Amino acid sequence: MQTTYNVFNKTDKVIEGWYWVLRSDKLKPKKATAVKLMGRDLVVYRTDQGKPVILDAYCPHMGAHLAQGKVQGSSIRCMFHNWKYNSQGICEEIPSLGGKCGVDARVKMWPCEDRYGLIWVWTGEKPGYPIPCPPELVGAKVRTVLAHSFQKKCHPHVVLINAIDEHHFNSVHQLPVRLQMEPVELHSRCIQFNNTTLPKPTSMLGKLINKFYKSALTYSMTYWNGSTGTVTLGPDFLHFYILFSLRSTTDGQAEGQTILLTRKRGGVLGYFVDQILLALTWIVGNYFAKGDTVIFSNIRFEIKTPIKPDHVILKFIQHVELQTISNWNTSDQLVGDASKERICEVLE
């Protein structure tokens, strides 16, 4: 019997959480940028102090796109009639009214941050957790590199499921050991899957790998809002970290950005060690992505006949189904007080 899901693999549902918007180096000072993200039109700019600001794109006066306007300090001025909106989206000046603002005119402001070389947006009123980071690196200074961006012909949920699909590591990637993932919810918005098996290999490669582990083979996948995941893997003495941030497109595909991370080491020698480790992380990530790319080019995901190793996938789906849905693609993008009463007042 096929199960119907309300949130999982649904293009019209945006889970409340952090999503990447664009690369930080694409957001130039004093220049507004138009972005269409998961079906919503936005304007993104930096204040004179370098802080990113994300607002809904359209001026509530007559619907002009604010990206055509001018950035002034921490505010943006609409090109059409020069209405000025501050970084909270509140209109603070209307030139045709002598510079004052006599109406309740505002555009929706979305919380945002600049981290890892990306601009991020929170698809809700107030962030419920920090921008994702590998749990082992929380509170630590890190060095990062933006790796490749990518697009897959399936929903982000399907792409991220692949990272905990135990048996595909052997069938697709020929991993010489078998994984057994166990889930643990870190909080209502975050779930982690950890491998619990000690390698018992028979091949020469497997026996070599086994020498670097005293306990279970280190492989951990942590998910936030079903669209961002961090991978932790490597021998006991040295872990590699990869962050995948994905977002859906209106036609049901996934746009992703890969971020490589390592713990920041001090001094000149530490810098070069970090660069070597980030390069090795890049190689590891590319190895696993190669085979998966072929599968995602024409997959039509439906889990009709689950088997025992699929229990972690079903747990991920269950977790996603419990997430909070944002008003991202349902709320009006033109906010103001243009009621019948207001129109009558103006006409009088």
Image (cartoon, rainbow, N blue to C red):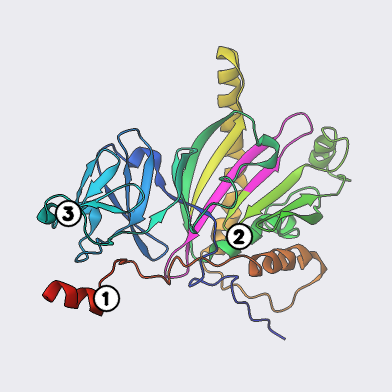
Tell me, for residue 226, which label it has, or none.
2
Q: Which residue is found at the position 66% from the left and 45% from the top?
A: 231
Q: Which residue is mark 3?
A: 94
Q: Which residue is found at the position 73% from the left and 30% from the top?
A: 238
Q: Which residues are magenta?
A: 230-255
Tell me if residue 168 is in the magenta stretch.
no
Q: Earlier in the sequence, mark 1 or mark 3?
A: 3
Q: Earlier in the sequence, mark 3 or mark 2?
A: 3
The amino acid type, in three-letter code, at marker 2 is Gly
Q: Is residue 42 left or right of residue 123?
A: left
The amino acid type, in three-letter code, at marker 1 is Ser
Q: Which residue is mark 1?
A: 339
Secondary element under disc 2, as helix, strand or loop, is loop
**Along the viewing direction, whichever of 341 and 120 lies nearer the viewer:** 341
In front: label 3 or label 2: 3
Q: Is residue 59 left or right of residue 163?
A: left
Q: Is residue 169 above or below residue 263?
A: below
Q: Where does the image place residue 202, in percent across and percent down from the top left?
A: 87, 45
Tell me if residue 252 is in the magenta stretch.
yes
Q: How many marks?
A: 3
Q: Where does the image place residue 328, in percent across and percent down from the top left?
A: 45, 65
- Circles 3 and 2: CB distance less than 8 Å? no
Secondary element under disc 3, as helix, strand or loop, is loop
**Along the viewing direction, whichever of 227 and 302 lies nearer the viewer:** 227
